[in-house]
Amino acid sequence: MSFGSSILVMLIAFVVGVDGILDEWQIFQPIVACTLIGAACGNLTAGIIFGATLQMITIGWINVGAAVAPDIGLPAVVSALLVCGPVALSIKHGIALTIPLAVVGQLLNVFIRKTIVKITHQADQAAATGDLARLTRVHLLSMGVQGLRVLIPTILVMLISPQAIKMVIDDIPNAVTNGIAVSIGMIAAVGFANLINMMVSRSLWLWFFLGFLIAIFTHISIFILAAAGLIVAISYVWVMNKRHGSSADDGGSGDELDDFDKELDDL
C-alpha cells in the first residue's frame, strides 16, 4: 500500500471513530466507511460490495439509552482494509472477522466512556466558570480519544505483514467459512425484513407490493425502479403535507371563530 493510501485510510479511521460517538454524518455506517476505505485502497468495487453486505448485518445495531450496541465503525474499517487492501481477503472471510471485531470495539467503547467521565467533570467546571475555550478543548479531547479507538487498531493491522494475516485466515476451518458463505445469501433478506418491520404501516403495504410486482413482471433495472420509487415517495409526501396544511389552516380559523363566538356569548 502506498504512503498516500495509508494516510487516507488512517484519516478515514479517525473520522469514523469520531462520528461513531457523534452519530451526525453517518460516516461510521459500513456502506459509507467501507466504500471510503475501498476508494483509498484503489479497490472501490470490493469496498461497495463488502459495505453493502455488512450494512445488512449491522442494520439493527443501535445504541438505545445506556445500552451500548456492538461497535460498527471498527469492524467496518478494519475488515474493509483486509478485504480491499494488500491482504485481499474474500468477502466471506471479511464477514467472519466482523463479529469478533465488533465485540472488541464494544468493549473499547464502554471502557473509553467510563474513562471520559473524569474529563466530563472538567467540562462541568469550565462551564461553571464560563471558560468556553477550556470547554471546547475538553470536547475536542473527548472526540479525539474516540477517534483513536478506531485509528490505533487500524494502524496495528497495517503494520502486520499481509502474508502473516493470510496464514492466520487460512487456518480458519472450512466449516466456519463455508457456513458464513451460505449465511451471506440470507443477510439481505434479514436486513430488508428488519427495515419492513420498523416501517410497517397499512398505508405502505400497497406501495411495497406494487414495487415487488413491477420488479418481477417487467424486469426493470433496480436503479430505475428505485429512482421512480423515490420520485413517487417525494411526490406523495409533498401532496399529503400540502393537504394536511390546508386542512389545518381551515380548522385553525374555524376554532378561532368558535372561541370568539363563545366569548361573545359570555358577554
Image (cartoon, grey):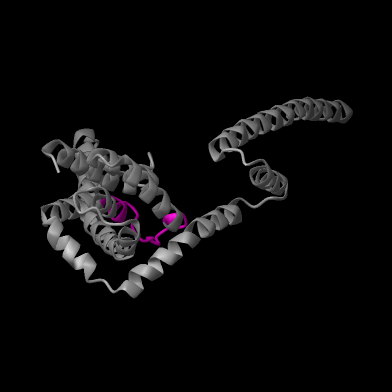
Q: Residue at x 64, y 52 (%)?
A: 200
Residue at the (11%, 56%) spot, across then down: 161
Position of 202 with respect to 103 (left or right) is right
| Image-quadrant location for residue 267 | top right
Q: Residue 257, how many percent across, how many down? A: 82, 25
Residue closer to the observer: 42 or 60? 42
x and y percentages locating residue 19 in the rendered image = 32, 44
Report whether residue 258 is seen. Answer: yes
Q: Is residue 155 left or right of residue 97?
A: left
Is 130 displayed left or right of 50 in the figure? left
Q: What percent of the width, then of the height, locates residue 77?
A: 27, 50
Residue segment shown in magenta: 58-77
Please determine whether, in this image, residue 19 is positioned above or below residue 65.
above
Most frequent secondary structure within the magenta stretch: loop
Q: Nearer the viewer, residue 125 or 220?
A: 220
Query: Which residue is drawn at the image coordinates 63% and 35% (left, top)?
Result: 233
